[in-house]
Amino acid sequence: MLAGALEQLGDRLQPPDWMADEVQHRLVLFLNHVLMQEPEAQARLMRQKGSRVRLQWRQFRLQLAATPAGLLEQVPDGEPELRLTLTDSSPLALAQAVLSGERPAVRIEGDVQLAAEVNWLVDHVRWDAEEDLARLIGDAPAHQLAQAARGAALALRQFVLSRTRPGAGGAGS
């Protein structure tokens, strides 16, 4: 029931275009920040320069291209070499999958080599939030905060898993 209500609410409430654009620009900046910490990832993207990847979920769409520097840039809609579409339209189901450590279901269409490179990036590139935080507040406080965040994330993941397993007490227990 809750999933259905959230689905209907999500269909009715859409962010304004300017907000969606700003979120996309910030996402590209963040992805490039993470990529700049991984030379191997940049080298792989350099080999794919100019290749376009379209990411889509419901009506939201983001099209990116690899730059000669091995980073990403947002490009206007056109015909991409690779299309990645999240197949689960429910925001709740998508959040549950991500929080339980699973990859969301994705339909992949297009260039197989580019898809393999994107898959490598997903498997091997990670944001080191603790390192970024240490630059702001120092090593020891950053380590403590990161440890607390990992503990909270683990507790949240365990809670989500306990609620999504068959036979695990649901909302009524």
Image (cartoon, rainbow, N blue to C red):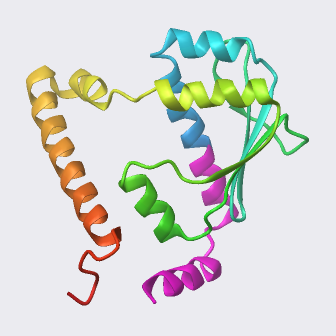
Judge from the rendering whether residue 155 lies leftward or rightward of residue 53; answer left or right. left
Left or right of 18, for residue 144: left
Quick one: 64 or 119, which is closer to the camera? Answer: 119
Quadrant of image for the C terminus:
bottom left
The structure residue drawn at horizontal position 61% and vertical position 68%, both measured from the top left corner, is 15
Closest to the observer: 12 or 147?
147
Give the residue displayed 58% in from the left and 25% down from the top: 120
- Residue ID at (56%, 71%): 90
Q: Is residue 93 positioned above or below 28 on the image?
A: below
Q: Quadrant of residue 131?
A: top left
Q: Please, what is the dominant secondary structure of the magenta stretch? A: helix
Asked if residue 14 is among those painted magenta in the image, a careful observer would answer yes
Question: Is-magenta flag for residue 103?
Answer: no
Residue 140 in the image: state x and y as whole percent: 8, 24
129 over 162 or under it: above or below: above
Relative to 75, say whether 33 is above or below.
above
Q: Nearer the viewer, residue 137 or 46?
A: 46
Q: Residue at x 72, y 64 (%)?
A: 59
In the image, taking residue 40 as reference, residue 99 lies left or right, namely left
Between 2 and 100, the one lying in front of the other is 100
Residue 23 in the figure: left or right of residue 144: right
Q: Residue furthest right?
A: 79
- At which x and y percent is residue 2? 43, 85
Residue range highlighted in magenta: 1-24
Quadrant housing residue 53: top right
Report the number of discs. 0
Percent x, y for residue 41? 56, 16
